[in-house]
Amino acid sequence: MNIVRYRHNDIISYGLTVGDQVTAPGSIFPGEGATDTGRLFSFLVDAKQALSGESSMLPLADVTLLAPVIPGKIIALGYNYKDLVGERDHYDEPVIFFKPPSAVTGPGGEIVLREDRKVWTEVELAIVIGKTCRDVTVEEAPGHILGHTIANDVTMSNCNGRDHHLARSKGWDTFCPIGPAIVTGADTSSLKMTNTINGTLMQDSSTDKRILNDAELVSFLSRFFTLDPGDVILTGTPANAENSVIRHGDRVAVSIEGLGTLENTVRAEF
């Protein structure tokens, strides 16, 4: 399934895409009064059943796609690609940091720059958690994954050499574009991934260069944090991210094979 979150006639709903169409709000409606994540999982209960029947559909061209999930937390990984850190006989673990949910923006949204500092983009495979987990094994971990989406880990240069926790560098509003869909059942072991700015290729790699895979990362992180439905894990970026510098007016497109393309424009406010 390809799960999207969209706005149509001022109503925000979840839907499933079929070709160039999406299920209409009236066919699978998650209900009012629930949290955004609650709506997502309420929607999923009836999604397969609805698509097997006569669901009414909308053209994708008539809706505005939004970030497919608003996570309770975003856990991100650094130094998880061999083409970035090199082949190593001994690898301890990736760097772990957080991005706030307020950093999320969706397909077509703006990345807003509010300081005159170097900012770059990073293409990342993102895991969306589907079932609460704590201290799960590598073998158990896949059963707790809902699906995958594309993320852009927008990053500002270190603030006076002091931002070692990365909160300011990584956490600005709009610094975590996610989308365009949550894709379930994908084999993410070897997917081509690219990052282009104004059509110029900046990053070109594959998920097979990751050091820790999906199951290993979920198991690893669940040792420290309870992972809840809707949480998002950014699994790291390959080489050449810091050369992917963005400026006012740029158009960024990050793509992962089988998951689509996430496009955003850049606007500077300084």
Image (cartoon, rainbow, N blue to C red):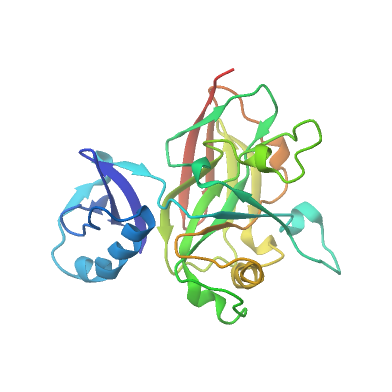
Q: Quadrant of the C terminus?
A: top right
Q: Residue at x 49, y 77 (%)?
A: 143
Q: Which residue lies most toward the top here?
A: 270
The x and y percentages for residue 183 are: 42, 61
Q: Which residue lies most toward the right here?
A: 89
Q: Residue at x 44, y 68 (%)?
A: 130
Instruction: For residue 223, say whether it is visible.
Output: yes
The x and y percentages for residue 265 are: 49, 30
**Quadrant hosting residue 233:** bottom right
- In front of the other: 161 or 124: 161
Left or right of 268, for residue 157: right
Counting labels gives: 0
Q: Residue at x 17, y 58 (%)?
A: 27
In this rendering, the answer to whether 243 lies above or below 114 is below
**Quadrant hosting residue 152:** top right
In this rendering, the answer to whether 108 lies above or below 74 is above
Q: Quadrant of the N terminus?
A: bottom left
Left or right of 175, for residue 224: right
Instruction: For residue 18, say whether it is visible.
Output: no
Q: Residue at x 72, y 65 (%)?
A: 211
The x and y percentages for residue 188 are: 55, 65
